Image (cartoon, rainbow, N blue to C red):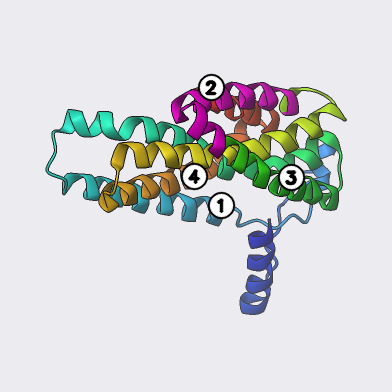
Amino acid sequence: NHLSYFYRGLDQKLVGVEPVEPIRTEGPQTHLGKKGTPTMGGVVFIVATLIAYVAGHLTLTTLRRLDADPEQLTALMALPLLVGGVAAASQYGTVGFLPSFAVTAWGLSPATAALLLAAARLLSVPAKLVSGNAADQAGSYRIARRLGLLLAVLGAGWTLLPVPVAPLAAVVFAAFVSGLGPVANVLAFERYGASGMLLGAFRSAQIGLAAAAGAGIGAVTAAAGLRPVLAASALLPLV
């Protein structure tokens, strides 16, 4: 949204035209609230797709340079990439749309929605500490599975339950999504050791998955609606 408003101002300065969302008057009355919404949001999806492509290309290029059996390499990369990919896609995809969902589904003001996300970011600090310590104590894979189950339950709660339960579940969900990050990092260090090349490929893949998740959710939402798409993506940690 912020980028769209930036582009609207830029277009006004360059060509004197204000690119806003045209709304047909014969459609549903609820759509009239979109009148005046800046367009060019597609630019964000294009950029995200390009980032995902570049990150994926760099990852594959890096892996090809390694002198290792492809099957062994796949087994080596699979688990950290699975956990790290879910963490990145959930944090920058699902959680990224939380403020929009709070406004459209719960009727909150944009300021209140932003406060919810800020509270989740603050709560993510102890969540990361707890998950990281738990991974040291009980094992990173076991904690990843437990976090996945917790996040799936919380995800179903904040996308399907009514207010005031849903916003509370959303804050905890967003906080503990960040907690998956340290667990994925522990898995990566356990598998890759001191290999800077593998760690670099791991991080590049995470960036690509995060960008692809945001672009994918935005694209599917245009056709299916925000609630069902977020309800499905919130269950991603079950993987």
Q: Which residue is mark 4?
A: 210
Disc assigned to residue 42: 1
Q: Residues within 10 Å of mark 3 (few under 14, many from 20)?
A: many
- Per the model, the C-alpha gap separating discs 1 and 4 is 17 Å
User: Residue at point 78% right, 51% down?
Assistant: 114
Image quadrant assignment for residue 92: top right
- Per the model, the C-alpha gap separating discs 1 and 2 is 30 Å
User: First in sequence: mark 3 or mark 1?
Assistant: 1
Q: Which residue is mark 2?
A: 238
User: In the image, which residues are magenta?
Assistant: 132-158
User: First in sequence: mark 2 or mark 3?
Assistant: 3
- Per the model, the C-alpha gap separating discs 3 and 4 is 17 Å
In this view, the mark in front (3 or 1): 3
Name the residue type under label 2. Answer: Leu
Q: Residue furthest front?
A: 137
Q: Main secondary structure of the magenta part?
A: helix
Name the residue type under label 4. Answer: Ala
In this view, the mark in front (4 or 2): 2
In the displayed structure, does residue 37 sit left or right of residue 15? right
Image quadrant assignment for residue 149: top right
Name the residue type under label 1. Answer: Gly
User: First in sequence: mark 4 or mark 2?
Assistant: 4
Image quadrant for the N terminus? bottom right
Image quadrant assignment for residue 81: top left
Residue 91 within the magenta-colored segment of the rendering: no
